Image: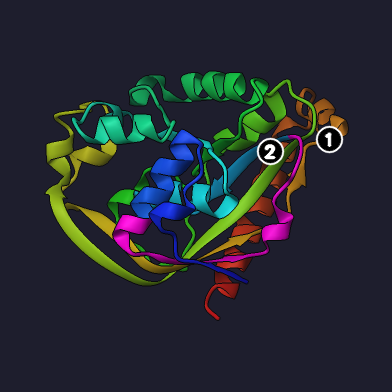
Amino acid sequence: MASFKLGISDMAVDGPLQVSQGLIAAMGTRMFVCYEERIPTDGRVLVISNHRSFMDVPILMAATRRSIRFACHYYMSQVPVLREIVTAMGAFPLEPHNQRQGHCLHRAREILQAGEWVGIFPEGGQAMVKLTSPLEVGNFHRGFAHLAFQAEVENLAILPSAIASSEEVVFQPIPLRLLSFFDPSEPLFQQEGWHPVVIYKQVKVLFGRPFWITPSQRKAYSGKLAKAVVADLLSQCRAEIADLLNQGRN
């Protein structure tokens, strides 16, 4: 297990990675990386992870030591300052709620075809607006599985990743309804309560075994077995991340 205490002198030349490393250094976060050898060294990679904090994106970039183009919530592209931060980290904002999935899949396919890595949080936004246990994983949306089977790229791997926080600070400074000003179409912002902000002070990042997408899976996806293939990939990936989080307790 590798331990990283990132400082300014450790930063890479890569822009989004540099921003991520700088943010972690500024937060004083101590990060441990487990199973680094499982990170693919070739091919195209779709990184998936549990999601509780705005720090998840920079944490995963620092742990993999490379830039990853993460899908981010639409409102993040509308809020001043936050908009500039997500842009600097190379994120691509989703469209408003009623246009979201089609745009996300299209943009992510383009990025993978260009040879870049893509990151998606399958739990969606619910885990961000409702504070959960650091070692809990919620239900997964199917979008990342459809992306994996629809992307017309060879040597595509899904890399399950788990972010297990052992020490953190939590604030709840923003009313959820206030965020509806920036995105009125988002159902999550039509409820009472406050948006939590989780800052990791000590965290483990554990990488699972990559799932390489095979031609036979894509063939099954294009036929009558599509639902079964998607459900199977969803189940395997979620189980892998849940197992990694359980290991993160130690």
**Residue 37, image x and y in percent?**
73, 58
What segment is highlighted magenta in the picture? 25-43
The amino acid pointed to by label 2 is Val
The residue sitting at 53% across, 38% down in the picture is 67
The amino acid pointed to by label 1 is Thr
The residue sitting at 27% across, 40% down in the picture is 188
Q: Mark 1 points at which residue?
A: 214
Is residue 116 in view from this perspective?
yes
Q: Residue furthest bottom?
A: 250
Q: Looking at the rendered structure, which numbered label has been put on residue 230?
A: 2
Image position of 43 (left or right of 102): right
- Residue 250 found in image quarter: bottom right
Considering the image in quadrants, where does the N terminus appear?
bottom right
Circle 2 — which element?
A: helix
- Pointer 2 local density, CA inside 10 Å: few below 14, some 14–19, many at least 20: many
Q: Distance between the residues labelled 1 and 2?
A: 13 Å
